[in-house]
Amino acid sequence: MNQTIAFIGLGAMGWHMASHLPKLGHEVWVWNRTQSKADHHSISFQTQSVDIEKAVQADFIFSCLPTSADVEQLIAEHPPKSGSIWIDCTSGVPKSAQQLNQALKKIGVEYLDAPVSGQTIGAEKGTLTVMIGGDVAAFEKAKPIIAAFSGLIEYVGESGSGFAVKAINNTLMATHLWALAEGLTVLKSKGVDLSAALNCINHSSGKSSMSENIMGQRVLSRSFDKTFALDLLQKDIGIAVDLIQQESLQLPSMQLIQEQFTHFEKDEASKLDFSAAVQGLEKMNQIELR
Ligand code: NDP
């Protein structure tokens, strides 16, 4: 049966994610706050730029916006049609997912929290990891559509669980980046060649995706190319820390990491790649990682 799919939010991630959907053979509608991007998308791919009133009439509606608050506002102003499934790929807040899930159920809509990981390169290649919370039957219906842009789709539990996994994942990413930057700061102060040191680490037990990709490509190169804004990572760490506090857990490193990632104010952070967070450490020690 031919179904309609809408994608809302053609940012750094959404642009690429939506580009894979036409291959499924369904009609694909795209909407973006800045309409010119949606028009451009429809020229570049086999999608149709539509107004928001039409987008929320689709059978499957994807959103990929900066925050849960943005999604809540959009849904409040433009409720989706009964019988549809809303797949929210925003890295959002678990409590918001639970509330949206309950509210949308009342109008016959299923809501899945379905955040993604794999950066813009994974979105472009269609190999994202998608972690999903919500109703299992809705998940099974949405899975073949989500598969258009993903390499791994994992159902992780009830509503909000996907957002929780994503927040913890990104806090781990931040921890790995910061710990690696601290390690390289010691080595630089000892006069060690950082590229050679990184090569050793990448062939040893201390490696991570931060050491294998981000440290060399963005920090040591001093390019700090922006693909994932630092303010979005600050938001994700904040979500993780809120979860810790809600559960009254004692997890000191995660709280310490949050402090380290707030050296830049939100406005400045929104213009920077997340890798620029290590510049806070560089300033503290007057040591540049290059
Ligand atoms: P971008 O800032 O690149 O894009 C945000 C998109 O949301 C734009 O299309 C923007 O429209 C739209 N938007 C912003 N505010 C609103 C609003 N109030 N109402 C409607 N539309 C709005 O973000 P990303 O694509 O980088 O990130 C999107 C989500 O994905 C975030 O939650 C992020 O944490 C997560 N993520 C990002 C990754 C990355 O590597 N970038 C990796 C994995 C997850 P406009 O064009 O008009 O500005």
Image (cartoon, rainbow, N blue to C red):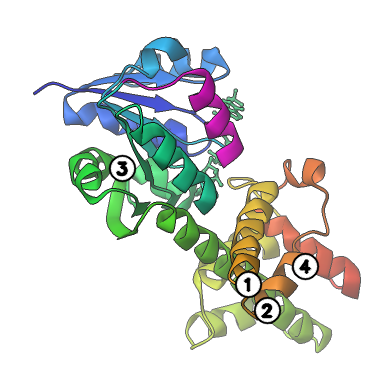
Picture quadrant of residue 34: top right
Q: Position of residue 239 (x, y in %)?
A: 61, 57
Going by the numbered disc 3, the residue's amino acid type is Phe
- Of callouts 3 and 4, which one flags the residue occurring earlier in the amino acid sequence? 3
How many marks overall?
Answer: 4
Dot 4: what SS?
helix
Q: Which mark is residue 260?
A: 4
State the image coordinates of residue 244 (x, y, percent, origin top left): 61, 69
Any atom of ligand 1 within 8 Å of the CB at mark 4?
A: no
Q: Quadrant of residue 7?
A: top left
Outermost residue, left direction?
1
Residue type beneath disc 2 = Ser
**Labels 3 & 4 near each other (Cβ < 8 A):** no
Q: In the picture provided, is 247 more to the left or to the right than 275?
A: left
| Placement of the C terminus among the 4 image quadrants | bottom right
Residue at the image position 18 percent from the left and 40 percent from the top: 141
Q: Is mark 2 within 8 Å of ligand 1?
A: no
